[in-house]
Image: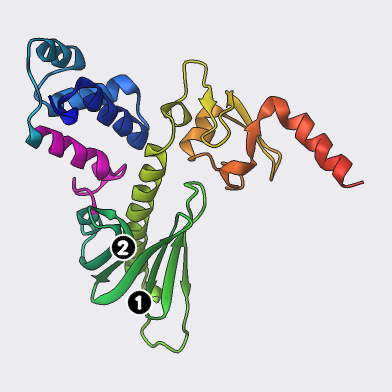
Amino acid sequence: MTTTESLDFIKSLAKKLARARRIKQFSALKVTAQQMGYPHWNALTVAYKKGWRPSSTQIEAMKEIVDTVNPLKSKESGTAGLDALCSVPGTTIVASIPRDDADPLSADEIFGVLDGHKFRLSVDCDDVFMDGRGWRIVVPEAPSATAEASVTDRRIKSNPILDQGFVEKALRVSQIRAEQVRARIASDWPRRSTVPDANGGVQHPLFGSLSNRWFCFHCDEIFTGTQIAKNLWHCPGCSASPIDIHPADEQALWNNEEFVEGQ
């Protein structure tokens, strides 16, 4: 039996799907079973014990779902991966330069055309940049942060960024790319960092601490575990990065340390 035929390997795909989509583990197991032709996970395990093994086609199809999962899928055209960008009317992808040839979503740069205007999509420190001649759109990593559209060269006549219809489309393209980046980040984190437990507790993806109340060292506000996880561990108030997020019961300690250092 090959490794990809093992039940543990199938479970690992389900776990990665759960992290990427930020859903419960049992939901991911059900999705995985249905992709393999069974109504639920128990039915799949029973069949496995009786000798059933997934085909290479089923495994590859499931891996594709996991690798190209797009949280905006239901809101767009039902496509995933680079095709999801083309779900915005007037958008065509011309080329991409991936870091990993086997994974087009790892692209350092994606080149395309929107309503006849060339653009380049790039990712830097998990922020998404969409650049064209005389314009730029920036979508920060933090879901709570506001995307910004700006003019980069005022000498350009008929700059498309001055057309509200174009801006709305460009924002949709860059937001889709940002959600793909966020899904990839979440898929690398423990499931407990993206899905709160029954008490609302979540595990910090970087430090490993567990709590249902968190405070931001940057703005000193307190938030629930659900709020923090939903915002990809950025502060829902000021969009500070995950390194500024700490358990609420440590707030007094951190504030006291800051006070002492300032003396």
- In the structure shown, which secondary structural element does the residue marked by tag 1 occupy? helix
* Residue 52, picture quadrant: top left
Q: Is residue 70 magenta?
A: yes
Question: Residue at 24% across / 57% down in the picture?
Answer: 101
Question: Residue at 17% across / 13% down in the picture?
Answer: 45
Residue 249, percent from left and from top? 70, 25
- In the structure shown, which secondary structural element does the residue marked by tag 2 occupy? helix
In this rendering, the answer to whether 63 lies above or below 211 is below
* Between 156 and 25, the one nearer to me in the picture: 25
User: Neighbour class for label 2 at 10 Å: few (<14), some, many (≥20)?
Assistant: some
Q: Amino acid at mark 2?
A: Lys
Q: Amino acid at mark 1?
A: Pro
Say how the picture is coloured.
Answer: rainbow
Using residue 144 as the reference point, say whether residue 177 is left or right of it.
left
Q: Magenta residues?
A: 58-81
Identify the mark at residue 160; answer none if there is no mark.
1
Q: Which residue is mark 2?
A: 169
